Image (cartoon, rainbow, N blue to C red):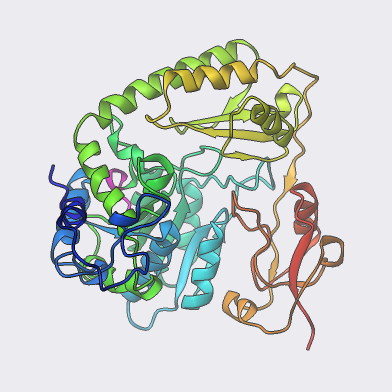
Amino acid sequence: MRTPIADVVRGYEREGTCRFHMPGHKGTGPIGCEPWDITEIQGADSLYEASGPIAESERNAARLFGSGATFYSTEGSSQCIRAMLFLALQNRPAGTPPVIVAARNVHKSYVYAAALLDFETVWLWPESAQTQSLCACPVTAKTLDETLSTMETPPAAVYVTSPDYLGNMQDIASLAAVCHAHKTLLLVDNAHGAYLRFLRPSLHPMDQGADACCDSAHKTLPVLTGGAYLHISKIAPPLLREQAKHALALFGSTSPSYLILTSLDLCNARLAEDYPARLAETIQRLNALKKSLTARGWTLTGQEPLKLTIDAAAWGWDGQELAELLRTGSVEPEYADRDYCVLMVSPENTPEDLQWAADSLDCAIQKPPIPHPALPIAKGERILSIREAIFSPNRATVHRTESLNKICGAPTVSCPPAVPIAISGERIGPEAAALFRYYGADRVEILQSE
């Protein structure tokens, strides 16, 4: 497969042109990548008005992902999330309110998008009154159908996160069928699942009926940090494809990184070659490791093929304590909280890497299990819109013990997983206060009385 962006960048480096343009390093510097770090020079195309090599590369990506159109982001899935929410709102029937139905385990970028775009959210909650993780919010087709049936007009879209940080995956095909029956769109935050397209069979949202989704290419594919995709499906309304560049430009820098664009471009060539075979081999090795760990008594959770999600509490460990043990063995996990420790794997991990992780886990002596407490679901009372709360000047940061019954200002999260406990504009109730304590969120931003 051709790599048009990389070809332009490499060609410019070889030419040795005298650079009287940005950036200021002029192609030299201590990092080593400076010769490839260019800007929108003649022939290099422009990301938001692409008609040359960038447009060709994005068409290559669309063919690889089987989408109606695929667009690049150099600012991660956060930019794509804002753009696809904007597109959904633009597509809604005239006169209908700006409302999105969303599973509660959204990334904080969703909250910031709600502030910028000023829409309301109808939240989908776990069916149980309690949960075992802030990260998870399973949504059934039945629950979604019941929610949509109670609404006077269809929302602009339904929005879910899948996979989540613990590797839990929604039934996208069933949710898409419900959305389309109610004449609304399904948007998926697939930040952790770009590779799902290359499984056999594919589990990617574009193949499961979603209308649009974002993929953080850098999370699971060989792409530099910040590289992401906005995919629009072949069945989505034409406006989504036609206005996607405009939507991305609204939320993106006018100086996108050509290093990131080049890595997205070169990734296309790797995906078109042996990546599916390498992915299958990696999953086979990881499944063998999971089977071995389970046989030794470890408890694993999540369905996502490339995540190793360890229930540390079942082994008698705090998840963060287990993460520190792994670090002493020079193994850096992706995420840990009181209950779980998550290792993210990709085909770039060698068999030796997996063995290294297994050997490090062998150093964790099993202890009596720590019971998983049933965590409350923090359904805070909406007092203000997200936009009103985010843009309020009357803000203060207080200790969590002082936050009860106050109105949440900015969402209080750690990153990862960047899932808000309380949403801006909600009154902080005892359930949210308990979750602040459980997840160690000691500082909470609130709105002060005027």
Q: Residue at x 16, y 51 (%)?
A: 7
Quarter of the image where one finds residue 42 = bottom left
In the rendered structure, does residue 209 fall within the stretch colored magenta? yes
Q: In the shown orientation, is residue 264 left or right of residue 126?
A: left
The kind of secondary structure the magenta stretch mainly shows is helix
- Quadrant of image for the C terminus: bottom right
Q: Residue at x 65, y 54 (%)?
A: 414
Of 214 and 256, which appears nearest the observer?
256
Q: Where's residue 333, x and y in %?
A: 58, 35
Q: Residue at x 63, y 22 (%)?
A: 299
Q: In the shown orientation, is residue 60 left or right of residue 144?
A: left
Magenta region: 206-210
Q: Residue at x 32, y 77 (%)?
A: 93
Of all residues, the one furthest to the bottom in this rendering is 450
Of 182 and 113, which appears nearest the observer?
113
Q: Is residue 230 visible?
A: no
Q: Where's residue 422, x and y in %?
A: 68, 62
Task: Give the vertical position of 188 relative to 298 (above or below).
Answer: below
In the rendered structure, does residue 270 fall within the stretch colored magenta? no
Q: Is residue 334 visible?
A: yes
Q: Where's residue 110, x and y in %?
A: 51, 63
Q: Where's residue 386, x and y in %?
A: 59, 74
Task: Give the vertical position of 195 relative to 8 (above or below).
Answer: above
Q: In the shown orientation, is residue 175 left or right of residue 302?
A: left
Of 86 and 320, which appears nearest the observer?
320
